[in-house]
Image (cartoon, rainbow, N blue to C red):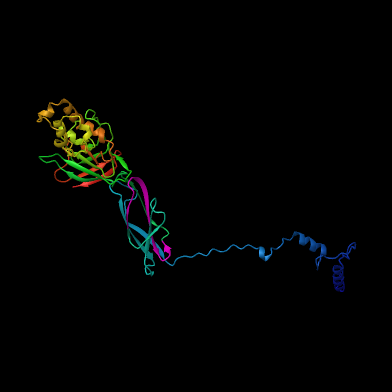
């Protein structure tokens, strides 16, 4: 192309774009592929295919998390605790000891601690001590003790842990061996149990075992309520309650050689002392059964005098009228005395009294296994779990 045509073509192109037309349409001029300015149609096509740029307000920015790290690191160790996964069967009082350290070691501040026992604590417990002593509920349960060092507001992110379990009777600490006496030349051995049960709490001790190095005894059935001297049958579980005392003696029962002839004394039992020998002391006191005057007006004067003046109403004793001829020959008087002042009549009259039954159980082991010097006596429940241990 001649050089002088180039300026002319540039001017024609500028005019064509501003006029919105294409002056070369239909003209067959061999012009190199040259487009100095985009046509209107090209601009419209580009506008259709281009992606719109979002407005600045619509752009979502993801904030970069700020990582705050302490300038020091805490570490916690447990120095005393039950062995990991140990089963504890002799106590529910557990002591933990622990220590903490900080790196770098020259970090300023005082290390404190936070502890937690799963199943006991609802949240961490702060302490400045390096020890925690806890009394756990008796029974069979697993626990995890955790402790973490703390400095300011920073805590050890990897607390030290110790897992263990208890295997104690639910009555551990509630029924105790309060005393142990070995047999002597004049009396058999005696073990005394006491209770600290709640007001409405009861424990069935039939099936419990008391054991020493020289022997053992399993507590059998007993008689809760001796209803009649003709019906002394041991068919009750021995059930104890708050403030009860259980006496286990090496003697045999006054009611027979069978080990089940154990019983709970009552306020009328003194009448039975005339017929049985009780190795363990029972009361002779008796409920006041002195008759009203109108009950005896039909008897003879010697009979009335004997009833009112010769009978000890504070004691459960069967009246002895054998030396009083006027009374012993008076069939009506003898019948009244015999039918009124005895165990069965006392039971019928007073068995519903609030304090009729005593807070005691007499258990006859018929064996002596208590060493005269030293031993460790254990009381276990029917599941073999420890209730109490007495070292003497």
- Say which of 327 and 239 sits in front: 327
- The residue lying toward the viewer, choosing from 243 and 149, is 243
- Determine the residue positioned at 82% across, 62% down: 41
Instruction: Return the x and y of residue 114 as percentages of the image width and height.
Output: 38, 59
Image-quadrant location for residue 126: bottom left
Image vertical order of residue 359 relative to residue 259, above or below: below
User: Where is residue 391 shown, x and y percent of the image?
Assistant: 20, 47
In this rendering, position of residue 332 left or right of residue 7 = left
**Quarter that holds the N terminus:** bottom right
In the figure, is residue 325 to the left or right of 383? Answer: left
Q: Position of residue 219 (x, y in %)?
A: 24, 36
Q: Is residue 152 magenta?
A: yes
Q: Main secondary structure of the magenta part?
A: strand
**Which residue occupies 36% across, 67% down?**
110
Q: Depth check: 365 or 139 in front?
A: 365
Q: Is residue 35 left or right of residue 216?
A: right
Query: Does the rendering let one see residue 178?
Result: yes
**Start-end of magenta stretch:** 132-155
* Residue 252 in view here: no
- Where is residue 17? Give x, y as percent: 85, 68
Is 142 a magenta residue? yes
Q: Please count the marks in the image.
A: 0
Q: Is residue 120 above or below residue 386?
A: below
Q: Quadrant of residue 349?
A: top left
């Amino acid at each position: 192309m001649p050089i002088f045509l180039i300026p002319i073509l540039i001017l024609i192109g500028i005019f064509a774009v501003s006029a919105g037309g294409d002056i070369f349409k239909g003209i067959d001029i061999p012009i190199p592929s040259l487009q100095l300015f985009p046509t209107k149609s090209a601009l419209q096509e580009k506008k259709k295919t281009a992606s719109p740029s979002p407005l600045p307000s619509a752009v979502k920015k993801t904030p970069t998390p700020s990582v705050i790290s302490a300038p020091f690191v805490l570490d916690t160790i447990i120095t005393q605790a039950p062995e990991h996964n140990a089963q504890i069967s002799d106590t529910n009082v557990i002591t933990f000891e622990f220590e903490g350290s900080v790196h770098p070691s020259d970090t300023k501040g005082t290390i404190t601690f936070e502890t937690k026992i799963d199943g006991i604590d609802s949240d961490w417990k702060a302490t400045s001590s390096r020890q925690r002593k806890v009394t756990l509920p008796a029974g069979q349960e697993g626990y995890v003790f955790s402790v973490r060092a703390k400095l300011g507001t920073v805590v050890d992110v990897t607390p030290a842990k110790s897992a263990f379990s208890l295997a104690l009777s639910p009555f551990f600490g509630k029924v105790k061996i309060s005393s142990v006496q070995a047999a002597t030349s004049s009396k058999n051995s005696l073990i005394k149990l006491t209770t600290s049960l709640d007001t409405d709490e009861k424990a069935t001790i039939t099936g419990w075992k008391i054991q020493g190095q020289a022997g053992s005894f399993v507590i059998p059935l007993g008689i809760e309520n001796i209803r009649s001297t003709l019906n002394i049958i041991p068919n009750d579980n021995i059930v104890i309650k708050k403030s009860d005392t259980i006496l286990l003696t090496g003697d045999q029962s006054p009611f027979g050689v069978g080990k089940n002839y154990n019983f709970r004394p009552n306020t009328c039992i003194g009448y039975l002392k005339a017929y049985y020998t009780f190795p363990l002391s029972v009361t002779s006191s008796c409920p006041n059964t002195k008759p009203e005057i109108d009950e005896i007006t039909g008897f003879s004067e010697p009979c009335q005098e004997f009833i009112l003046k010769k009978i000890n109403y504070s004691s459960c004793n069967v009246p002895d009228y054998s030396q009083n001829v006027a009374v012993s020959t008076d069939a009506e008087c003898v019948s009244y005395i015999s039918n009124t002042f005895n165990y069965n009549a006392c039971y019928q009259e007073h068995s519903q009294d609030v304090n009729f039954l005593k807070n005691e159980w007499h258990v006859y082991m018929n064996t002596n296994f208590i060493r005269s010097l030293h031993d460790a006596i254990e009381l276990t429940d029917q599941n073999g779990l420890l209730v109490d241990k007495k070292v003497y």
